């Protein structure tokens, strides 16, 4: 079940954001649903257009980052979504202190493509140690088509 601490802020004066903590046994689908619901509010409450491809891309990024946190870190993780500077910022904190290694693309490797995918569809990506654990953040542009750019086509 989505966290005991689920907060959503929809004040029209501030950058819209939502946050939820997930504990062991949580379904990744709930994290994607939070992203879908949040972006729906961004569009209806704040009047910020959210193209369908952005919705899909943000849900993919949320799924990959929360899956990694659930798989490799003990304890809960915290998902925060924010719209600012023309992008959706997806941030996941977890209690594991070890930073993940981003593997070079390898079509023959089975698995461990999550961060590779996140980096390919994001306009920004960062990893930071926190006083406890780490935070991984990806920014998905609201206006560009990063997948189209990667594949050599414009959307």
Image (cartoon, rainbow, N blue to C red):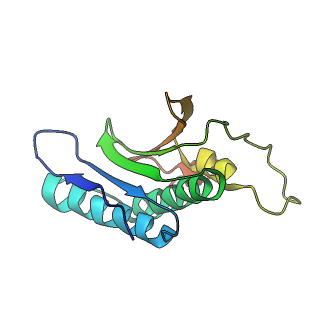
- Residue drawn at x 55%, y 29% is 129
Residue found at the very far front of the displayed protein: 75
Percent coordinates x, y for residue 25 in the rendering: 52, 69
Q: In this rendering, is residue 90 above or below 155?
A: above
Given residues 67 and 36, the one toward you in this image is: 67
Using the rendered view, name the quadrant where residue 6 is placed. Answer: bottom left
Using the rendered view, name the quadrant where residue 14 is placed. Answer: top left
Using the rendered view, name the quadrant where residue 102 is placed. Answer: top right
Given residues 101 and 6, the one toward you in this image is: 6
Percent coordinates x, y for residue 152 in the rendering: 65, 50
Given residues 72 and 52, the one toward you in this image is: 72
Residue found at the very far right of the displayed protein: 108
Numbered marks: total: 0
Percent coordinates x, y for residue 139 in the rendering: 46, 42
Residue 118 seen by the camera = yes
Q: In the shown orientation, is residue 92 left or right of residue 104?
A: left
- Residue drawn at x 22%, y 54% is 8
- Residue drawn at x 35%, y 64% is 34
Given residues 12 and 101, the one toward you in this image is: 101
Residue 142 seen by the camera = no
Percent coordinates x, y for residue 86 in the rendering: 33, 40
Q: In the shown orientation, is residue 15 left or right of residue 101?
A: left
- Residue drawn at x 54%, y 36% is 134
Q: In the shown orientation, is residue 17 left or right of residue 133?
A: left
- In the picture, which quadrant includes the N terminus? bottom left
Q: In the shown orientation, is residue 149 left or right of residue 144?
A: right
């Amino acid at each position: 079940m989505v966290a005991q601490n689920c907060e959503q802020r929809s004040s029209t004066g501030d950058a819209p954001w939502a946050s939820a903590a997930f504990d062991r046994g949580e379904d990744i689908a709930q994290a994607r649903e939070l992203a879908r619901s949040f972006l729906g509010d961004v569009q209806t409450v704040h009047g910020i257009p959210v193209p369908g491809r952005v919705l899909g891309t943000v849900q993919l990024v949320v799924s990959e980052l929360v899956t990694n946190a659930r798989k490799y870190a003990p304890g809960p993780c915290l998902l925060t979504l924010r719209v600012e500077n023309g992008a959706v910022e997806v941030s996941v904190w977890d209690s594991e202190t070890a930073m993940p290694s981003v593997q070079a693309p390898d079509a023959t490797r089975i698995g461990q493509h999550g961060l590779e995918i996140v980096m390919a569809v994001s306009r920004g990506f960062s990893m930071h140690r926190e006083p406890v654990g780490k935070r991984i953040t990806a920014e998905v542009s609201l206006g560009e088509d990063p997948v189209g750019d990667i594949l050599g086509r414009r959307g």
